[in-house]
Image (cartoon, coloured by chain):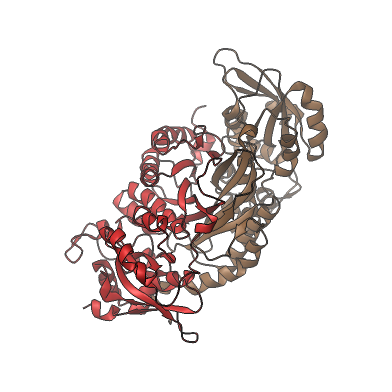
Chain colours: A red, B brown
Amino acid sequence: MSDSAYAAAGVNLDDADEAKLLIRDAVRSTHTAQVLGGMGGFGGLFAIGELPERDPVLVSSIDGVGTKLKIAFALDCHESVGADLVAHCVNDILVCGARPLFFLDYLALGTMNAAQVGAVVRGVAAGCRAVGCALIGGETAAMPGFYPVGEYDLAGSITGVVARDRIITGAAIQPGDVVIGFPSAGLHTNGYSLARRIFAEVDLHEYVPELGRTLGDELLQPHRCYYDAVWPLLDAGLVTGMAHITGGGLVDNLPRVLPANVAVTLDAHQWDVLPIFRLIQLQGDVNWDEMARVFNLGLGYVLTCRPDAAERVLALVGQHGARQVGAVRERTGDEPQIRVEGLGSVAG
Amino acid sequence: MSDSAYAAAGVNLDDADEAKLLIRDAVRSTHTAQVLGGMGGFGGLFAIGELPERDPVLVSSIDGVGTKLKIAFALDCHESVGADLVAHCVNDILVCGARPLFFLDYLALGTMNAAQVGAVVRGVAAGCRAVGCALIGGETAAMPGFYPVGEYDLAGSITGVVARDRIITGAAIQPGDVVIGFPSAGLHTNGYSLARRIFAEVDLHEYVPELGRTLGDELLQPHRCYYDAVWPLLDAGLVTGMAHITGGGLVDNLPRVLPANVAVTLDAHQWDVLPIFRLIQLQGDVNWDEMARVFNLGLGYVLTCRPDAAERVLALVGQHGARQVGAVRERTGDEPQIRVEGLGSVAG
């Protein structure tokens, strides 16, 4: 077939074939013994006949990278957003106590660009390999006229497993529990629409002394994956509840797992409210209440444990920068379930 | 919080809350006994402790709707594309012999529009209910500046299950096998970039006599789901191979499951090459070779069976319009694995 009508309409199936070749090795590098068959099937196959979990429950989540992609486009840097996507999804199911089994990615592009597809999928595969998760399928779709040339959207779904009696829901959280926070690496994948508006006039290549790097580098900082850090705690049964701090920030995410009778107070002096957040607050004149509803403010993952387990928990996760950042108390009436203290003063 | 900086940046979290309320009932209507917990968790939970399949293998696929969405935008009609997405994914895993367990959807919008989100997710839920598949999670993301106001991208992932010794790979296909084809309802979700280019000057609301409906109605015809039709055949062990005719058309999809030593000849006189395809071919002056590499040409799903099983197969699926459309033969040298005969003459 020569230059075809379909190619003239912006869809080149030969480019798609080239992209497939480029990503084949990256995909294969993630395959565990449970993956059956190769690429090219209509579905990915994952054997679960010998799961070690008793009464296994699958935990699945789907997500995207949001408008962080605009930063990747501007810097022509596409591998890290692939890894971001996986980290986000892994953290989402980790909250329930699940370990990752397999992943699938969806990449929709304005034009099929084999090099770009290759970079994104290499990033996805690297994120998967890091946590022993198999990349068993994906869709790469050319959607001309839908995305500008050189741009794309990226989403992915993860499926993991947890033994039914090890599911963490947060229902076990009690007044007196200690709140442990894990540092984030930056914005992760949330709040970019606001951040991009505030920095609209700033050159991404500009070095920003407060950040110690260029603005572009800062905004592409990886979404941290907490699986390795948190897993030993789950194994030891030390956790009463967990939250991944994503869209909705600290204020919306922690209450998702809190029983109705408790509230949490966080003390912002106990962790590093990263310079990027102080910069956004200042440049955008955003009040701290809203900052806490949009951004992770330096805490990417939060968990609770009994006070008498806190020392053991911190001994296990201190190497990952985790610290006690607050406490669970009895809730009074219908007061908000989360209060973040000290944000104004850490800003100074 | 009053009118916030985040809202000014195009992300309104209150609209997102309204959208959540609107889709809650639709989501719940899909929940089977295996679904644990409600909405709002970071991940969806699906218990697999009592799967009836021996040595179960999960089969998972992710896909989108492609630029068919542009037709949905133009007609302001958003429910059917939700159902299309599920049908596409169900067919993709059905090819391996899998029955659907659960689904997650990803909806990224230029602006959060609760009514639009509600319509799309109702469609997704309807598609799920039709096949007993639980909608256990989803992501609805506002991505201002990424999608125009009123537009969105939609993707979804499905996970199903098959007993290991019932997996259909196509490896069993032999020369002499009969090819059975199931009618499509139109373009399904593939080839829209080409179709939209060819019909760029045509008003979607225009009645087209050859189609018996408006062009818009034709292009929004649902992606047919073949699960109900095909399942009894799998149950009876009558199938040697299956293909879902998606991107790449008849020519690229059937060979995906053919062993290297066989080839298939299809006879286009044996099924209805729908009027829309003849119209596209004529209007766009697209040659039939390319038509067969882009479109399903009226066959949405194809399977093979032994010749002595054909009568029983047709008795079971004849009610769904399935017919014998070709045969499997020995392949000579490295000839193409598929030949479609008679396309030129059915066009007249």
Say if A82 sits above or below A271 in the image: above
Q: Which quarter of the picture shows residue B117? A: bottom right
**The one of A29 and B343 positioned closer to us in this rendering:** A29
Can you give x and y, in whole percent of width and height, for residue A321 in the image?
A: 27, 62
Image quadrant in which the C terminus of chain A is located: bottom left
- Residue, far top: B333
Q: Which quarter of the picture shows residue B1? A: bottom left
Q: Residue at x 27, y 73 (%)?
A: A270
Q: Is residue A143 rendered to the left or right of residue A74?
A: right
**The one of A332 and A24 positioned closer to us in this rendering:** A332
**The one of B139 and A9 positioned closer to us in this rendering:** B139
Can you give x and y, in whole percent of width and height, for residue A160 in the image?
A: 49, 50
Can you give x and y, in whole percent of width and height, for residue B303 in the image?
A: 69, 31
Q: Which quarter of the picture shows residue B341? A: top right
Q: Residue at x 39, y 54 (%)?
A: A231
Can you give x and y, in whole percent of width and height, for residue A89 in the image?
A: 44, 54
Q: Is residue A296 visible to the viewer in this orientation of the structure?
A: no
